Structure formats: C-alpha cells, structure tokens
Image (cartoon, helix red, strand yellow):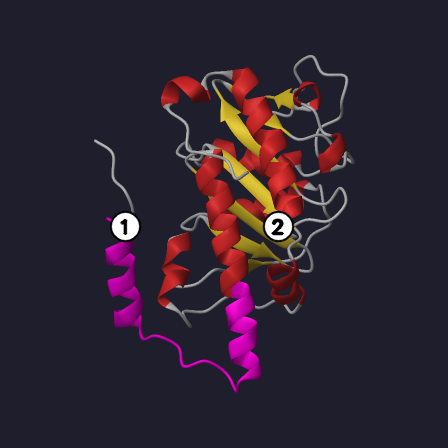
Amino acid sequence: MPPTSSSSSDLSDEHALRGALVGVMRQLAADGLNRAAAGNASARCGDHFLITPTGVLPADLEPAMIVAMRVDGTTLESRYRPSSEWRFHAGIYDARPEAGAVVHVHSPYATALACARRDIPPFHYMVAVAGGANIPCVPYATFGTEALSRHVVRGLADRRACLLANHGLVATGADLARAWRLTVEVEELARQYLLALDAGGPVLLTEEEIADALRQFEGYGQQTG
C-alpha cells in the first residue's frame, strides 16, 4: 500500500519511519517505478536521516536494514551500507530544511526523458505540482558522486522534483507520502509528454497560464490548520 502522511509525532518515531521506507520501496516496485534493486528512498528523522541500503531487493528489505546517517556522511551504528546515492539525499536535507523525505526512481518514462536530456516543459498545468514552470533535467555525473549531488541540489533549488540526465528521477516532499505521490505524478507527466511528442508535439502553456497554475497550487489539496 502507498505510504500515508504522518503527524509530527510519527515523524520522530524512527521505528515507524523504517517501516514506512520498506513499504514505499515495495510500493515503487509494485508500481513498476523501480526494478530489482534500483532506486532508493530516505526520510528525515530528528537530527539525522534514514536511508535504504545499497543493493537490497525490496522484497528482502527489512526495517533493521535501513541505515541512519548524518548529513556529513557519518553512518550511525549500522551493519548495512547506505544507498550509493546517499550524497544527494544528504545534500537535499542540508540545503532544504522543509524537505522531510526524498524518493529516487529509475522509472520508465521519466528515465527515457532523462536519457534524452530533456526537461518536462509546461505542456500541462500539472507540471506546476513540482513547484515551477518546468521539471528540469540536471546535467549528468557518475552515480554516487559529489558532483551528482551538486547537480541535484542545484536543480531542486526552486523545485520539488527533477530528472537526472541518463539516470532517473528525484522527488522530495514534506514527508514520505508526499514524496511518493510526487514521484508517481511526475512519472505520469513524463508518460503524457512522450505521448504528446509522438502526436506531433504539445502546445505549451504560456508564461501567464503556467503562472496562474502555480498560484492555484498554493492552495491545492486538503489544508491543515
């Protein structure tokens, strides 16, 4: 099942977050957004963050395998090695205090666009769900490197999601549920954009039209007091 939004008290519960990370990785696999051991996910937990381990199939993943880390790369008492992409997770948490979770996938449609090194332009108003007039594709760098982390952090400076050239998709959220949901939404936008390209190319929204959509998204969804 997809993750559910958590209260602030739940977010401080490391055991619950470990279980939620296992759940989201299995859901991503079930949805076809990751295959085998591809992709990773993390969630902020107090003064550190929790991240999925490297090279473990979602079906084999257990809460005890989730690795606790600090943003400086220090691993906190774990027998498991963190995802090879821990650097851009750490970079996002360091640069974006509002980010509570990060999801990374090698999903088919977003990855196809990433391999073409194409942004997702404002062909549909839902592009605004990622926080801007487009969903950028950041430059290529070898996976797991500090160079890739810099590209991702820069690409997310005013966005909640970006494509990684010749690699995949990264989405962020205030919690794991929101990061998962945005991942699904961006993958669907990538699919629709590729279909529109096959149909002769989309008519893009104007600056004014996408700006109106961005304003609408400021109050979109259920609001909490």
| Secondary structure under the numbered disc 2 in the rendered image | loop
Q: Position of residue 81 (x, y in %)?
A: 75, 26
Kindly identify the residue that appears in the image at 58 percent across and 32 percent down. 42
Q: Position of residue 161 (x, y in %)?
A: 49, 51
Q: Position of residue 22 (x, y in %)?
A: 63, 30
Q: Main secondary structure of the magenta part?
A: helix
Q: Which mark is residue 74?
A: none
Residue extending furthest toward the front: 1
Q: Which residue is mark 2?
A: 31
Amino acid type of the residue that numbered disc 2 sits on in the rendered structure: Asp
Quick check: is 194 in the magenta stretch? Answer: yes
Kindly identify the residue that appears in the image at 55 percent across and 58 percent down. 187
Kindly identify the residue that appears in the image at 77 percent across and 34 percent down. 56
Tell me which label, 2 or 1, sits earlier in the chain: 2
Question: Where, quadrant-wise, is the N terminus in this rendering?
Answer: top right
Specify the segment rendered in magenta: 190-219
Q: Which mark is residue 220?
A: 1
Residue 23 occupies quadrant: top right
Kindly identify the residue that appears in the image at 35 percent across and 66 percent down. 125
Residue 91 occupies quadrant: top right
Q: Is residue 138 above or below residue 201?
A: above
